[in-house]
Amino acid sequence: MTQLLGEFDCKLDAKGRLMVPAALKKQLPTAESEGLIINRGFEKNLVIYPKSVWDAVVADLAKLNIYDQENRAFVRAFTRGATELSLDAAGRVLLPKSLVEYAGIGSDLVLACQLDRIEVWDKKSYEDIFDDVPANFANLAQKVMGNKKGGTDGE
């Protein structure tokens, strides 16, 4: 399983290209051969998936009952704008203009690794979401992770 780590401040060039930071590129050894997928996030952000992770997400979507209207609406909304990214010889990717506009991304952005995917945020928007972090992070941790017993694997 892919486990990506780090936060990276980046800039888009005038053509909408993003230089993938070397430290992140090292964590994505198959990106050049397999590719990456970028898509809309659940918030006003974008998400980059390694191709193998995207394939697993799509496999889960394929298990949904297509005769259920909510399932169709979810799949349609979730996959809207999904685009394959390719690294060029200089290690850059061209972000689709429609997705950049959707997320309100300016020239300064943050790549925030989230387990097996990378969230792409406008830098100011990313900083703003942390203004809303609950005052008591310990209580949030207990609410979200409190059903686990012992170690991180639930033992």
Image: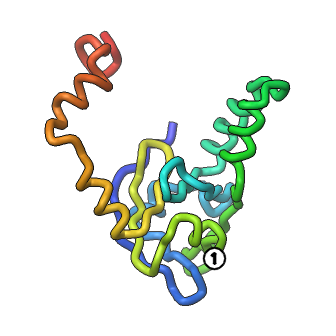
Q: Is residue 111 left or right of residue 54?
A: left
Q: Which quarter of the figure has residue 65?
A: top right
Q: Could you say which is closer to the camera, residue 98 or residue 69?
A: 69
Q: Residues within 10 Å of mark 1 (few under 14, many from 20)?
A: few
Q: Quadrant of the C terminus?
A: top left
> Is 101 located above or below residue 81 in the figure?
below
The residue tagged 1 is: 88
Q: Secondary structure at mark 1?
A: loop
Q: Could you say which is closer to the camera, residue 52 or residue 130?
A: 130
| Residue 102 in the image, given as x and y percentages of width and height | 58, 65
| Residue 126 in the image, given as x and y percentages of width and height | 35, 61
> Is 15 located above or below residue 33 in the figure?
below
In the picture as drawn, the residue positioned furthest to the bottom comes out as 14
Q: Is residue 109 left or right of residue 146?
A: right
Mark 1 belongs to which amino acid? Asp
Q: Which quarter of the figure has residue 140?
A: top left
The residue sitting at 49% across, 80% down in the picture is 12
Q: Is residue 8 left or right of residue 14?
A: left
Q: Which quarter of the figure has residue 141?
A: top left
The residue sitting at 68% across, 30% down in the picture is 60
